[in-house]
Amino acid sequence: MLFGWLGYSIYHQLAHRENLEQSLAHMSRTLQEKGWIGLLLVLVLMFFNWGLEAKKWQKLVRPLEPISFMRAFSAILSGVSFSINTPNRIGEYGGRILYLKNHNKLKAIAATIVGSFSQLIVTVIFGLIGMLYYLNNFTLVKENSYFPPNFWEKIVFGILVVICVLTILLYFRLQIILAVFEKVRFLRKAKVFVQIIVRYSAGDLRYLLLLSAARYVVFSAQYLILLDALGLEFLWWQAFLLNSVIYLVMAMVPTIAIAELGIRGKVSIYFLGLLSTNTAVIIAATGGIWLINLCLPAVIGSVLLLGVKIFKDK
């Protein structure tokens, strides 16, 4: 229902554009002239994107059992196929742990959460930088309003800064989480499944943050390259900063993959629309990235899952 409503809203917004046909024609010409190279580059970067995530997961599960990079990469793609219809892609955990030994499966969930934790921290940090740029350069509240310009946005920014600081402190003090499991009676039995989180040194956690930052740059570059390939004119640094706000919003909104396409489309129109009125290209690039970075890996992961099942049957 959410996807249907958002899809209709986006369609209505596109259909009432006066220069829609010209925008589509320009997008087609740009794609034919130079866009195929950009599209190919985006496809190649998809493997770098999930490859960095595989490197993170390989590092995370090493205290449980060493696995090869290719096995970790297969686990990541299988996790994507599991996550396609689950809220905020939590199904990724189920797909990944299939590649581990039975006695390590539940323990690996805690390790995977630590990896997601590191990616969230990077997303929030970049998002706050982008939000600071947005607040200082785009005043969207009328001057005669009771509140000063961007009042509520600044309140949200302040709250997010506090949350970010507390999250970073907790990330480097994961033993606090284990202590909670030890002190809360109904969580004590599950303590054995989260003990892995205290095996990571500060150096390991910094390394995970570095990989998360590299992955963030890769999938941000994918989106900007696709926008350029489809003919959107923008300054790269401005688009990167506003795109970081889009990722921040998407990280905060609970959704499933199919609805994510519509939500991200609306959010992208709102923020990137501050740089360009070419809504058609923004929607096309959003849909293209969704297909390349989520649907294509999910299809590959589904095939790999079949291989896992055949191996177990044997």
Image (spheres, grey):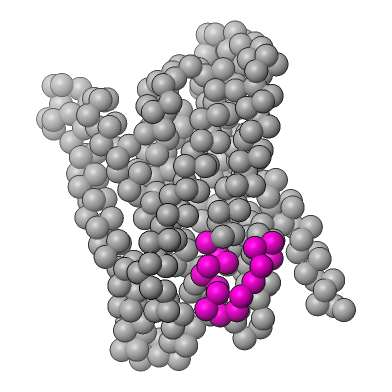
Q: Position of residue 15 (x, y in %)?
A: 57, 18
Q: Residue furthest right?
A: 314
Tell whether 220 sits left or right of 1: left
Nearer to me, 116 or 23: 116
The residue depicted at 42 percent of the width and 79 percent of the height is 199
- Does the magenta-highlighted stretch encompass residue 179? no
Question: Quick one: which residue is furthest to the front in this view?
Answer: 203
Question: Along the horizontal axis of the image, is 115 left or right of 22?
Answer: left
Across and down, in percent, residue 208 comes to 44, 61
- Which x, y percent locates residue 9? 52, 30
Residue 233 shows up from this direction: yes
Task: Return the residue nearer the eye: 204 or 139.
Answer: 204
Question: Looking at the image, how many numbered discs can be counted on the residues?
Answer: 0
Q: Is residue 217 left or right of residue 168?
A: right
The structure residue drawn at horizontal position 20% and vertical position 47%, both measured from the top left corner, is 158
- Is there any visible trace of residue 78 in the rendered image? no
Name the quarter where the C terminus is drawn: bottom right
Quadrant for residue 52, please give it.
bottom right
**Residue displayed at 68% across by 32% down:** 40
Give me the residue at 37% from left, 27% from top: 238
Per the image, is 69 magenta? yes
Q: Quadrant of residue 280?
A: top right
Q: Which residues are magenta?
A: 56-71
Residue 275 lies, with reference to residue 253, above or below; the image says above
Residue 105 coordinates in the image, percent (x, y): 60, 78
For the N terminus, the image quarter is top right
Could you tell whether 240 is left or right of 215 in the image? left
